[in-house]
Amino acid sequence: MIQLINALANFILLAFCIWAVLNKRLDTQVFGTAALSMVAITSFVNIARPDVFGFWAEQAEVVSNVAVAILAVWFWLRWRKCNCGGKP
């Protein structure tokens, strides 16, 4: 059951990342696009778990956590820019 929940969560995360990167109205810039792409790739690897990926298949959850941490910093910087006017 937990594997099904994990696969569903990864599928939703993959769909969101693809939507966010391809959406023309969402200005993700380079940093956001790279982080969203990394999350999408690791979500795909978590779903598929192909043996061809070797290291990536084994460490995809770690890479996914790093990518989500990068996204958290990116979202915080974007929020700060929008709500604080870019003041330090």
Image (cartoon, rainbow, N blue to C red):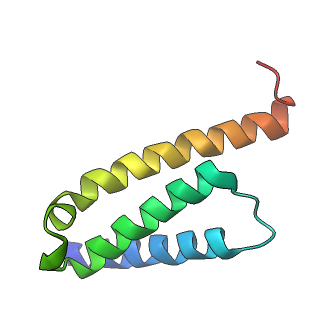
**Image spot of residue 29 (x, y percent):** 70, 54
Q: With 51 as the anchor, is 37 left or right in this view?
A: right
Picture residue at 19% right of the left edge, 71% below the top: 53
Q: Is residue 5 visible?
A: no
- Which residue sits furthest right? 85
Q: Nearer the viewer, residue 3 or 33?
A: 33
Residue in the image at 46% along x and 74% along y: 14
Q: Position of residue 13 (x, y in %)?
A: 47, 70
Looking at the image, can residue 4 be seen?
A: yes
Of 11 and 53, which appears nearest the observer? 53
Q: Quadrant of the N terminus?
A: bottom left
User: Residue 46: percent from the left, percent from the top?
Assistant: 27, 71
65 to the left or right of 74: left
User: How many numbered marks are there?
Assistant: 0
Quadrant for the C terminus in the image:
top right
79 over 68 or under it: above or below = above
Residue 10 image offset from top left, x and y in percent: 38, 72
Quarter of the image where one finds residue 80: top right
32 vs 88, left or right, is left
- Residue at the (64%, 38%) spot, across then down: 76
Single out the residue that lies furthest toward the top: 88
**Residue drawn 13% across the image and 68% down it:** 54
- Up-down relation of residue 64 to residue 22 (above or below): above
In the displayed structure, does residue 57 sit left or right of residue 85? Answer: left
> Relative to 18, does residue 63 appear above or below in the rendering?
above
Q: Is residue 43 above or below residue 36?
A: below
